[in-house]
Amino acid sequence: MARKRPYGVYIFLFLSTLSLAAHAIEPVPEHRDVQKPFGVRHGDILNDVIDNQDQPEGAESQQYVTEALELLNTIRPPLSNSRRKDSTSYWIHQGLYWLQTTLDFLFVANVPTQEEPLNGEARSAPAQMSKTLLEAENLLMRALSMKNPDAMYLLAEMNFYGNWSHPRNTATAFGFYKELASLTGNSTAQSMLGFLYATGYGGIIQKDQGKALLYHTFAALGGNARSEMTLAYRYHAGIGAPRNCEEAAFFYKRVADKAMAYYHSGPPGGHYLPRNNHKIVDEIGGTYGAGASVGHTGRLSKRNDHNSLSLIDDIIEYLLLLSNKGDLAATQQLAKLYYDGPRGLARDLRKARDLYFQLAKKMWTKDGKEVKDPSDTVIEVAAKAAGHLGRMYLRGEAVPQDFALARRWFARGLKYSDTVSQHGMAYLYEHGLAGLEKNAEKATKLYKSAAEDDHGAAQVAIGKIFYGKGEYAIANKWFELATRHGEVEAYYYLAEINNQGNGRERSCGMATLYFKHVAEKVEALQAPLEWSHRMYKSGNKDVAIIGFMMAAEQGYESGQANTAYLLDQLKSRFPLDWWRVRHSDALDEELALMYWTRSAKQQNIDSYVKMGDYYLAGVGTEADAEKAAACYTAASEFTQSAQALWNLGWMYENGIGVGQDYHLAKRYYDQALETNTEAYLPVTLSLVRLRVRSFWNTVTGGSINAIGSDPEPEKKVTVMEWLKRWFSDEKPQYTHNRPGEFADQEADAAHGGQDGDKAHQADPGHEFYGDEDEEFVENMVILGVMFVIAGLIWYRNWRAQQRDQQRRRAGQAPAQGPGNGHAPAPPPGPQPPPGFQGFDPRNNAWHVPPPAGQ
Ligand SMILES: *[C@@H]1O[C@H](CO)[C@@H](O)[C@H](O)[C@H]1NC(C)=O
Ligand SMILES: *[C@@H]1O[C@H](CO)[C@@H](O)[C@H](O)[C@H]1NC(C)=O
């Protein structure tokens, strides 16, 4: 156990406690009536549409739409699209915005407050529409009055997403979508209606899962991929409909088929699939920040390379430095990074191309001859560069597509058994490209060689060959190998094998999971994730949430976590807009809880902890301490979430949601510390408090299960030793045989000891003893303070009782007497942390705000 105590952590903890306390006194928002008439501005026009039933001016209205689109396409992307939040123009823009808002507030009597939550209307006042946009809108309105569906669609989209920086108005958008859906049965519009009913987004309509299911079903049968995906997820997870694996597999397969069709419509080797399916919190170190979140401290941290996101810039910089110094291996790695575009880095094919050419030049001169006596390093990097250059010519990436050149580069790489070249050449043979005869045999041989060298795409190719021959077991093996490279086609074939029961028992569950993966990998068909992340980065959270919410509805775990996280954050989004009426917080909270829940069910441990927080505090739901305890338990069972363990300890200590049990409380606190050593301060404070309470409980003969290692005064020990033992980490004797409860015991055993003290002695690596004295002094100081405070509290109570008795003697009933005679004296507990609101004699506990709410 590391005993370093970073004092920054102390300060941080202090501040977080303060902010917790501040949250605790925030009043609970009232439920707002969400029903609201829609279509303020466009309502009349909609009525016109319905009135003018007999106007068949299709061609003329289409002309208007075309003109409008021409105008719209001249509009530059809005400022908020700029990627850099820190650019000067952004801040000027922001400054002007706040200035204007403040002036509005000060001098305009009735600021038109936009009622809708979660969207950006408040930020883009209607007056800000540009002249071009107004003209275009007028044209669309004219087309609309002739019931032109395209105009209706465009207006709906503009009002919903804010395309071409049109001010957003969800109510208006809803009206147009609804009209379009009933007029033409347009599946895009139906899908949008399904989304709006499912989420109650914008607070304009009541959530209605029945209607959502209906609209999504219509849209899905009309072939809308988003709705198919949503339906599939609903049947898969049992949301708004009973769980049904067959339905889920059916709809997921429909999307997966589309996904594969899209994938194969790309250049040889398939479309490049951008990856925007990641969580916002990954960039800030997890839901609870770095340290407390599972992905960073629990067991997952070894598996997931979350840090890569923030590290990628550093890595690039470092590689650039090495590369400039002439390090060929570094240059090669850099080129690969640019070519692959890992998460957090945009692909840069031109840079990759230039670097690969640079490397290839070390080996091959202009006239195609090899240099004399190349070193091993040169051979290695140049062969890889040749393979990638061939691939770029094959696919037309940053160079014009040219099969002959591709073949030439592959041939060069092939000479040095470069796997990319083997795969590329095999592809040319398989399809008879670049003047080669089709030759399945040669192709297979090359594929095989590359596949055995762990080339993902080649493994897929080999798998497909065996699949075609009906040798499913071997095919399955190759596909499974290829999934490690994230090959989407491999997932698709695995899904098919499970779905059809090829050479094995059919498994609907496995098929669904594989199909889901395929569908989610091809993001382009579904939610505008790239757009959402861009919006989020440019500070436009309210708009970003749309795309995340859509992804969430379609079953993306990242979408669910992002939506919940943003809703969680939105509560305090603009501290300056305090004058605006706060509304619909309750709605947001309910949605946030819903998405935390869904995300948790997809194995997001931090979301489980969040769920617990919401249940404990009664945010977005009725407070339910038992459910909270269940959530924390689940979170601490899957992996060790320090936050969950600490919360559990706290619940056992106070008997909230679970039976009060000091002994178990201590176990959980200890485990929290074991999971995350950064939790040293909160855990120590909690432990001291717990010890005092447990001690008091024992002394007063309380019935609560006390901490196992209670002092035994009969034994002759000095006070110092006794106190020292009190604080030592030793494990109570009877706890280690609770089977399977504490997984970390294996770790202890591995350290060479069975029981606490022995374990520490047996392990020379423990720096426990070196620090013990310092820690002991520290603990004594804390304890001293505790006792003083306890004394003061006792004195205050004593005084109060005296006063009561005096009053009673004076014949006056006490305002709040000790009641039925056996009211327990409050324990001489330590000073309640900030945020504690008082002692509750009913359950012998302090009223505390939920632990670690955000
Ligand atoms: C829905 O309507 C819009 C506008 O008319 C059109 O562009 C789109 O293709 C339609 N969608 C379907 C699935 O018909
Ligand atoms: C409006 O913007 C959204 C989000 O980028 C996009 O998905 C949608 O296709 C756009 N609509 C139109 C009509 O361009």
Image: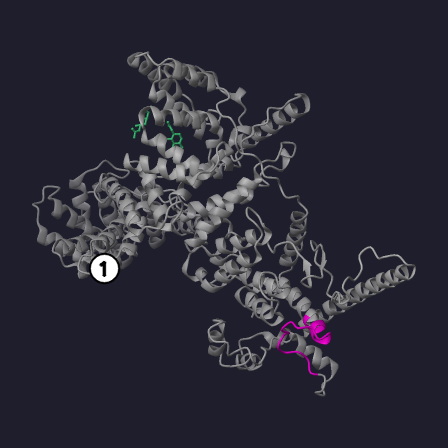
Q: Is residue 78 above or below residue 118?
A: above
Front-most of residues 794 and 36: 36
Instruction: Give the number of callouts.
Output: 1
Examine the rendered structure and indicate whether residue 529 appears above or below residue 664.
above
Residue 195 shows up from this direction: yes
Q: Secondary structure at mark 1?
A: loop
Query: Considering the image in quadrants, where does the N terminus appear?
Result: bottom right
Q: Quadrant of residue 191?
A: top left
Most foreground residue, 181 or 254: 181
Question: Could one spot residue 518 in this view of the protein?
Answer: no
Which residue is most to the right? 810
Give above or below for 757 relative to 105.
below
Q: Quadrant of residue 4?
A: bottom right
Instruction: Give the residue at x 15% y 41%.
Output: 404
State left or right for residue 718 relative to residue 180: right
Looking at the image, in which quadrant does ligand 1 appear? top left
Instruction: Give residue 107's position: percent from left, percent from top.
Output: 68, 21
Reply yes or no: does residue 697 show up in magenta.
yes
Q: Which residues are magenta?
A: 694-712
User: Pointer 1: what residue?
Assistant: 453
Inspect the image, locate mark 1, and give the three-letter code of the amino acid beneath it.
Answer: Asp
